[in-house]
Image (spheres, rainbow, N blue to C red):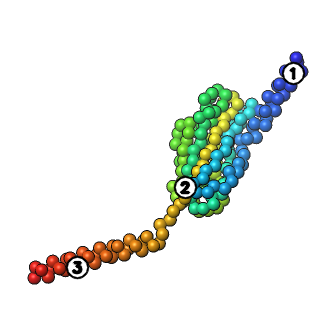
Amino acid sequence: MKHLLSLAAGLILAIGVAGTSASADTIPLGNISPGGSASDNGGEVGLHPTGVINDTFTFTLTAASFISGNIDTTFTNQVPALFFADNFTAMLNGTIPLTLSGGSVSTFSYGGALAAGNYTLVITGTDSGAFGGAYTLNLSAVAATPIPAALVLFLTALGGLGAATWRRRSMGEASATA
């Protein structure tokens, strides 16, 4: 019986030590195409959490896109004494802070279109549960559709036709009153 208890204690400690290395992971999300999405888990789960979450997600946009996403802690924060994660921040490419909404599902988006290419998204936060905290990152991309140059040309021509019509009418009224 003592041997079984020792084995169980060793297993719990091994899980705890293995779980603490998850606090500073680099997690590849792969390619994200416009209209596509990616998701993965982050955070720290183990017997002895460090209290800090610092995860880097890498992804590649295959075409110019707007990105948005959320950090979901709905499942893990149901038992806050055991698993709890909060105080999240998000930073795109190390220099662009993203504003997060509050709650168990914190949403974020980047206001401008991102060119096709490689990006990093760093998520930081805190965990305060006895076994750390965890979250799920969901990221999606929507195609950035630029206004074609032909549309600008069309609107300029339409404005010119409107100006010509206005001038013709005003010239016609001036000659009718003379």
Residue 26 appears at what percent x and percent y? 72, 49
Within the image, what quadrant is residue 66 found in?
bottom right
Q: Which residue is mark 1?
A: 4
The answer to whether mark 2 and mark 3 are in CB contact below 8 A is no
**Residue projecting furthest to the left:** 178
Amino acid on which disc 1 is placed: Leu
Amino acid on which disc 3 is placed: Arg
Secondary element at tag 3? helix
Within the image, what quadrant is residue 130 found in?
top right
Inter-mark Cα distance, 2 to 3 = 46 Å
Inter-mark Cα distance, 3 to 1 = 99 Å
Q: Does residue 111 appear to the left or right of 121 in the view shown?
A: left
Query: Which class describes the residues within 10 Å of circle 3: few (<14), some (14-19), or many (20+)?
Result: few
Amino acid on which disc 2 is placed: Val
Mark 2 or mark 1, which is nearer the start of the sequence?
A: 1
* Closer to us: 28 or 96: 28
Q: Which residue is mark 2?
A: 142
* Closer to us: 148 or 49: 148
Say above or below: 8 vs 96: above
Q: Is residue 93 visible?
A: no
**Residue projecting furthest to the front:** 35
Say above or below: 171 vs 116: below
Mark 3 or mark 2, which is nearer the start of the sequence?
A: 2
Q: Which residue is mark 3?
A: 168
Residue 152 appears at what percent x and percent y? 42, 71
Residue at 86% x, 25% y: name it.
7
Secondary element at tag 1? helix
Residue at 84% x, 28% y: name it.
10
Closer to the eye: label 1 or 2:
2
Mark 1 or mark 3, which is nearer the start of the sequence?
A: 1
